[in-house]
Image (cartoon, rainbow, N blue to C red):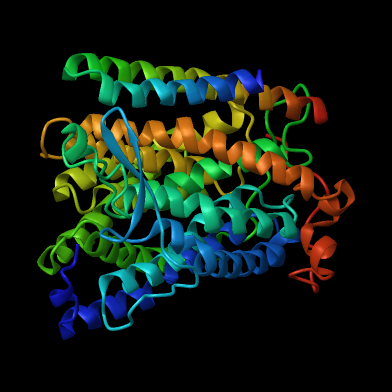
C-alpha cells in the first residue's frame, strides 16, 4: 500500500506536468491539472493509511 | 528583483541589514513555541535541538546548499523537454564562493536563506518532539538544507521552472511565493508529515479502543512568548523576501507589514471564536497555533493581495485550523505535538491557493499555483519520504522506549530542564 501511495503521488505529478507542454488549450490543460491533483490526493490517502496501519501494529 | 544600483543605495542597504538582523527572531520564536508545546521531560532537548538544527542547516546550506539554489540570472542547468527549457538547478561554487559583499542582492539572498533553511528544519523538529533522536535529526537536516530545500527553492526563488511558468506556458506570473510559504513553510510541513509517519506516535498517545490521549503542553507562556518573537521575525521575513524574490519596491513594504499583521490577527480571532463555540472556552494552544498559521498563510499573500484579501486568508486559516488539527490527530492518527503539519503545511498550501484565487493577476495564475502545490505533494513529499526512510535505516530516528519514558532530556542530554521539580506523571491524560 505504501508503494502504491508513493506511485500514485508521483503519477499525479507526472500527469500534471505532462499537461503543460502537451495540451494547448487552457480547458484541457486545467482538466488534466485537476486530474493530476486528484490522483495525488488518492496517493496521499493511501500512504497515510499505510503508515497508520504500521504505527497501529507497533503500538 | 532589486536592481543592483538600487541595492547599492544607502537606505536600501540599511533596510536590508536591519531586516536580516530581525529575521532570526522567527526561528527563535519557533524554537520556543516547539519547546512550550512539548512535555517538560523533553524541554531542554527541544531547545538544544533547535540550536543544533539551526547550526547544521546553516553550515550545510553554506557549504553546498547555495550551489544548487543560486539567484536569478546566475548560471543554471536546463533540461530540454517538450520544446521547453526547464531550469531545474543552479551551478554555483560551494562555500558562497564568488559572492560580492558590496550590497548585491545575491549576497543578501544567500544570508537571508541561511536563516530560512534553519526555520524549515525546525518545523519537523517540533512535530517529531519527544521521540526523535538528535543525531538522526541533525543528519536529516544536513540533507534537507544541503539538497532538498535549495533545489526546490531554486525552482521558486532562483528563477527556476516554477517561477517561469508565466513565460513558458502563459500561466499568470508563474508560481508566486513572495514570502516563502512554499519554500519554507509548506516544505517544512510536508517534511514534518514524513517524519511523523516514519517515527510513529509517542508512547501512550493512541491507546487501543479509546480516543487519542491529550499530552498537554508544559509551558504555554513559553509558547506565547515565542509567538511574539515569531511575529517580529515574520514581518522582516515577508518584507525582505518580497524585495529580494518578487521585486517588490520599498514603497510597498508598509502594505506587506499590514497584510502580515491582518492575516495573523484574523486567524487568531477566528480560532478564538471557533474554539469558544467548540469547547465552551477559548483554547490557548490552538489560538497560538492559529496565530502562526495566519503568519504562514500571510507569507503567500502579503505581497500579492489587498489588505481585505489578506484578512480573509487569515480568517479562513484560523477558522479551519482547530478542525484540521482534530482531523489530523483523530482521523489520521498522526501525533504532531507542535502542529507542524497543519500550522505550516496546510496553512501554507491554503495561502498559496488563496494567492491564485484572490490575486488580480493575469489569467492562469490559479493553475500556476496548483502546479506548485502539486509539485510539493506529488514530487517533494515522496522524495523526502523515501530519502528519510533510507536515512532511518542508517541512523534510526526513534528513541529507545526507556529513553522516551524517562524523557529525552535525561536520555540524550543526561539532565532534565527542571531538576528541582517533579513535574510529570508517567501517563497521558484521558479525554
> In this orientation, which residue lies closer to the viewer: B208 or B254?
B254
**Residue drawn at the location 79% of the way across and 41% of the way down:** B203
Image height of B396 relative to B249, above or below = above
> In this orientation, which residue lies closer to the viewer: B206 or A46?
A46
Q: Is residue B384 visible?
A: yes
Percent coordinates x, y for residue B332 in the rendering: 59, 27
Percent coordinates x, y for residue B310 in the rendering: 22, 47
Q: How many marks?
A: 0
Looking at the image, residue A16 sits to the left or right of residue B334; the answer is left
> In this orientation, which residue lies closer to the viewer: B14 or B247?
B247
Quadrant where the N terminus of chain B lies? bottom left
Percent coordinates x, y for residue B341 in the rendering: 52, 41
Quadrant where the C terminus of chain B lies? top right
Percent coordinates x, y for residue B31 in the rendering: 55, 63
Q: Which residue in the rendered view is the most extreme toward the right? A: B402
**Residue drawn at the location 31% of the way across and 42% of the way down:** B161
Image height of B178 relative to B271, above or below = below
Looking at the image, residue A9 sits to the left or right of residue B164; the answer is right
**Residue drawn at the location 15% of the way across and 33% of the way down:** B170
Q: Quadrant of residue B83?
A: top left
Q: Is residue B268 visible?
A: no
Image height of B114 relative to B37, above or below = below
**Residue drawn at the location 12% of the way across and 31% of the way down:** B363
Amino acid at each position: 500500500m505504501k508503494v502504491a501511495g508513493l506511485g500514485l503521488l508521483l503519477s499525479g505529478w507526472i500527469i500534471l506536468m505532462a499537461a503543460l507542454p502537451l495540451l494547448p488549450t487552457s480547458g484541457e490543460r486545467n482538466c488534466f491539472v485537476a486530474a493530476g491533483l486528484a490522483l495525488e490526493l488518492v496517493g496521499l490517502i493511501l500512504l497515510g493509511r499505510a503508515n497508520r496501519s504500521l504505527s497501529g501494529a507497533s503500538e | 528583483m532589486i536592481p543592483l544600483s538600487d541595492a547599492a543605495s544607502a537606505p536600501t542597504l540599511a533596510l536590508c541589514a536591519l531586516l536580516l538582523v530581525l529575521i532570526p527572531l522567527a526561528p527563535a520564536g519557533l524554537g520556543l513555541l516547539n519547546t512550550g508545546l512539548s512535555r517538560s521531560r523533553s524541554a531542554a532537548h527541544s531547545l538544544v535541538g533547535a540550536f543544533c538544527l539551526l547550526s547544521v542547516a546553516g553550515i550545510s546550506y553554506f557549504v553546498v546548499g547555495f550551489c544548487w539554489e543560486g539567484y536569478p540570472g546566475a548560471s543554471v542547468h536546463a533540461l530540454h523537454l517538450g520544446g521547453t527549457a526547464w531550469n531545474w538547478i543552479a551551478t554555483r561554487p560551494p562555500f558562497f564562493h564568488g559572492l560580492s559583499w558590496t550590497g548585491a542582492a545575491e549576497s543578501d539572498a544567500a544570508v537571508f536563506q541561511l536563516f530560512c533553511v534553519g526555520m524549515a528544519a525546525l518545523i519537523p523538529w517540533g512535530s517529531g518532539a519527544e521521540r526523535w533522536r538528535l543525531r538522526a535529526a541533525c543528519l536529516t537536516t544536513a540533507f534537507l538544507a544541503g539538497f532538498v530545500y535549495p533545489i526546490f527553492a531554486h525552482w521558486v526563488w532562483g528563477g527556476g521552472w516554477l517561477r517561469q511558468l508565466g513565460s513558458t506556458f502563459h500561466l499568470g506570473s508563474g508560481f508566486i511565493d513572495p514570502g516563502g510559504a512554499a519554500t519554507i513553510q509548506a516544505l517544512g510541513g510536508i517534511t514534518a508529515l514524513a517524519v511523523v509517519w516514519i517515527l510513529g506516535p509517542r508512547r501512550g498517545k493512541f491507546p487501543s479502543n479509546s480516543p487519542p490521549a491529550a499530552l498537554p503542553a508544559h509551558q504555554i507562556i513559553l509558547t506565547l512568548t515565542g509567538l511574539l518573537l515569531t511575529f517580529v521575525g515574520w514581518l522582516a521575513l515577508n518584507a525582505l523576501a518580497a524585495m529580494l524574490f518578487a521585486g517588490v519596491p520599498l514603497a510597498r513594504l508598509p502594505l506587506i507589514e499590514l497584510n502580515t499583521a491582518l492575516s495573523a490577527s484574523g486567524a487568531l480571532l477566528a480560532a478564538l471564536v471557533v474554539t469558544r463555540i467548540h469547547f465552551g472556552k477559548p483554547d490557548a494552544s490552538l489560538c497560538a497555533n492559529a496565530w502562526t498559521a495566519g503568519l504562514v498563510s500571510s507569507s503567500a499573500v502579503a505581497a500579492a493581495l489587498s489588505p481585505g484579501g489578506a484578512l480573509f486568508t487569515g480568517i479562513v486559516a484560523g477558522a479551519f485550523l482547530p478542525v484540521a488539527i482534530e482531523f489530523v490527530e483523530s482521523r489520521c492518527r498522526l501525533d504532531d505535538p507542535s502542529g507542524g503539519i497543519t500550522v505550516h503545511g496546510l496553512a501554507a498550501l491554503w495561502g498559496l491557493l488563496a494567492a491564485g484565487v484572490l490575486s488580480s493577476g493575469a489569467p492562469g495564475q490559479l493553475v500556476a499555483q496548483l502546479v506548485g502545490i502539486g509539485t510539493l505533494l506529488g514530487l517533494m513529499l515522496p522524495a523526502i519520504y523515501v530519502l528519510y526512510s533510507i536515512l532511518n535505516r542508517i541512523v534510526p530516528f526513534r528513541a529507545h522506549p526507556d529513553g522516551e519514558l524517562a524523557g529525552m532530556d535525561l536520555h540524550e542530554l543526561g539532565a532534565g530542564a527542571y531538576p528541582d521539580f517533579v513535574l510529570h506523571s508517567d501517563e497521558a491524560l484521558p479525554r
